[in-house]
Amino acid sequence: MAIQFFNTLSGKKEPFKSLQNGKVTMYCCGVTPYGNTHIGHSRTFFSYDLLYRTLKDQDIDVAWARNITDVDDKIINKANNENVSCSQIVSRYISEQNEMLELFNLIRPQHEPKVTETIPEIINLIENLIQKEYAYVSKSGVYYRVRKFDEYGKLSKNKINDLKVGARIEVDEAKEDALDFALWKFAKVGEIFWSSPWGDGRPGWHVECSAMIHSLFGDSIDIHMGGRDLIFPHHEAEIAQSEGASGKPLASTWLHAGMVTLYGEKMSKSTNHFVAIKDFLSKYPSEVLRLVFLSVSYGQPLDFTFELTTENLKKLARLYRFVSLVDSYAEQTNLNPSLKEFDGVIFAELSNLSFKMKEFLADDLNSNGALATFFDFIKGVNTQLARLEKLGQKLRREDSVLLKTKWPEFKNWIKNALGLLVDEPKIFFENLRKYNLGSEISAEDIELKIQERTKARSNKDWIKSDAIRDELLAQGVQIQDSPSGTKWIVLI
């Protein structure tokens, strides 16, 4: 199946072709661990995860790296403020990040290089750039000559003469040009440092990624991914460094995840306007956040709200209720082999459902399109089953056989390709109870209502049956009929 991505470098959607057939090298930008991981950070991690899963689902061998910036001004400042070492700060928040990866079922890359473990490679790259006159030594460090790289701005579409010194361009009188950026910063009193041919110091922010990519994968990779906020100056600087040193394209395809806002405003730690992962998990199951992100194309901006999250929690519950229902039919053995009214078309479509969803994912990771296809399928199945139920009929034996083979395959595919439906429905709903806002009706009263409804159904009193169902629903209780009986959950 052909894959296509929206390539930031070309500015258009285009067919994806790897440098080596059947193999992909990919690098994704990680975080600077100096504070609590929040929802905005996690969006890029979920995008990386979806990309990796989609490539693997196409039987592609993926070599993947995601860096850890474990030395940075922010880390140094926090360490000084707390009177601890930089390594202690990094260890604290890397542990939190790793916990997040596990809780959200996010796949870890094969390589997670750290700046502090890549110093020799960084020094070698800088020496190469100095030798080729792309870099120079000043009184405050080593800088990259931006104007010497003719293609600077090709990713961000910035024209070099239009760039202004300011928010994202370092101001330093020691630079030849205000646009030049630091490759190596000479040490200041009280800062962590390493020895280099130019003096004690530490790497600039941009150079680490170029050095890591080169040391792991060589001069060129297939895919480079990160948040949209990294296009300029970070990824632009990476291109200048790497291609200035090697003369070869750094990456064929550049993918960028859209920004996440919180109720219409940028998330910011400085103003405390963000949602920490640990706070999110106190209110919602971890799988809900995956569905939130999958419901919007990875490249589009997303405005996070708790209303949106609650809506997706209901969608997730709907998915699990459907799984529980179909599991019950797949396990059913007492079937009527002579039934002709149900032709099995809906369940036969199960064979093609994963293929249709794969087509969406292969089209620039269109997870929202894939999910819409799944929900349409659920609606169609529920409609057919409701019709059979009111006719007092059961599935044919051949339909059940199809379910017994195709349904487990599909559930496994959903789990592997989208990271959804990882629990058994019973476990999901048991875990869900601790998040429920609660209903005024007691469990005993719910069971009595269900018994009353069951009696009405046995008498084919569908009006009363539906009225009881609607009454429970109005009180926040969702019921689901299945061959093994009627089940219920309290909705959020």
Image (spheres, rainbow, N blue to C red):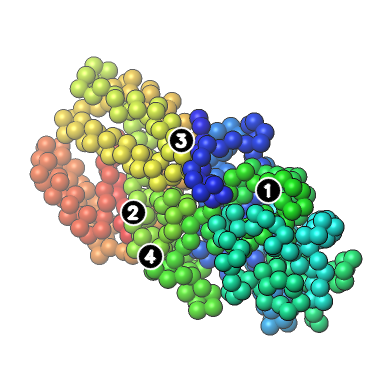
Q: Of the residues under marks 2 and 1, which one precedes in the sequence?
A: 1
> Where is residue 340 shown, x and y percent of the image?
21, 19
Q: Of the residues under marks 4 and 2, which one precedes in the sequence?
A: 4
Which three-letter amino acid code belongs to the residue tagged 4? Phe
> Looking at the image, can residue 352 be seen?
yes
Which class describes the residues within 10 Å of circle 1: few (<14), some (14-19), or many (20+)? Answer: many
**Mark 3 or mark 2, whichever is nearer to me:** 3
What is the secondary structure assignment of the residue under circle 1? loop
**Residue furthest to the top:** 338
Q: Which residue is mark 3?
A: 358
Q: Of the residues under marks 4 and 1, which one precedes in the sequence?
A: 1
**Mark 2 or mark 1, whichever is nearer to me:** 1
Residue 374 lies in quadrant = top left
**Distance in Å between CA atoms under marks 3 and 1:** 29 Å
Residue 339 lies in quadrant = top left
Q: Which residue is mark 1?
A: 250
Which three-letter amino acid code belongs to the residue tagged 2? Lys
**Distance in Å between CA atoms under marks 2 and 1:** 43 Å
Q: Which residue is mark 2?
A: 314
What is the secondary structure assignment of the residue under circle 4? helix
What is the secondary structure assignment of the residue under circle 3? helix
Q: Residue at x 20, y 47 (%)?
A: 451
Q: Which residue is mark 4?
A: 306
Which three-letter amino acid code belongs to the residue tagged 1? Leu
Residue 139 lies in quadrant = bottom right
